[in-house]
Image: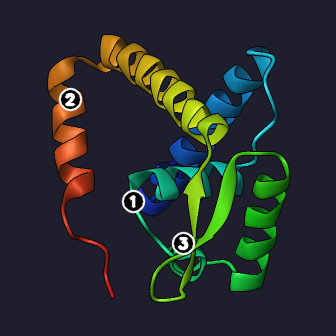
């Protein structure tokens, strides 16, 4: 039996640990509980105009599931649906959604700084450089 995990398993394992850490710390802040999918959707909308279908494709979930997620966020006051001049429907963050994204980014930056204190700034830069490269097989 092997004791060494593959690169895929190592990345997956760290991703799960980091998501849990973010969610645990978010919960301790005493604010609304935001699921991983909801957080992803808010972050993508915060980056710029993007369709629900595109976020669903990137997250590898159905459009229907992502739309349901968006409707829940709308009901909770994080986003709103808007129709543009071409009669296309898209979403925008509300003030509450923008505030969530600011707090979320701050929390992630705090965790990144803690990781940097453990690994060192140089390793963080190398890791970011590697993860930003296009090396996923298609």
Q: Indicate which disc residue 55 carries.
A: 3
Going from N to C along the chain, the mark reached first, 1 or 2, is 1
Going from N to C along the chain, the mark reached first, 1 or 3, is 1
| SS state under label 3 | helix
Q: Is residue 16 above or below residue 99?
A: below
Q: Nearer the viewer, residue 49 or 82?
A: 82
**Distance between the alpha carbons at the discs numbered 2 and 3:** 30 Å
Residue positioned 81% across, 31% down in the render = 32
Foreground: disc 1 or disc 3: 1
| SS state under label 2 | helix
**Image position, residue 126 (x, y; %):** 16, 38
Foreground: disc 1 or disc 2: 1
Specify the quadrant of the image occupied by residue 90: bottom right
**Image position, residue 63 (x, y; %):** 69, 83
Residue 5 appearing in the image: no
Q: Quadrant of the N terminus?
A: bottom right
How many discs mark residues in the rendered view?
A: 3
Residue positioned 54% across, 54% down in the render = 12
Q: Indicate which disc residue 48 carries.
A: 1
């Amino acid at each position: 039996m092997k004791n060494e995990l593959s690169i895929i398993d190592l990345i997956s394992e760290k991703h799960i640990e980091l998501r849990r850490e973010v969610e645990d710390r978010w919960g301790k802040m005493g604010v609304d509980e935001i699921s991983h999918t909801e957080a992803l959707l808010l972050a993508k909308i915060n980056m710029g105009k993007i369709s629900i279908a595109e976020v669903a494709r990137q997250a590898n979930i159905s459009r229907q599931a992502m739309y349901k997620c968006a409707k829940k966020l709308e009901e909770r006051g994080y986003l709103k649906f808007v129709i543009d001049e071409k009669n296309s429907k898209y979403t925008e963050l509300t003030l509450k959604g923008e505030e969530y994204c600011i707090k979320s980014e701050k929390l992630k930056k705090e965790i990144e700084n803690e990781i940097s204190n453990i690994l060192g700034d140089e390793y963080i830069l190398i890791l970011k450089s590697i993860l930003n490269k296009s090396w996923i097989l298609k």
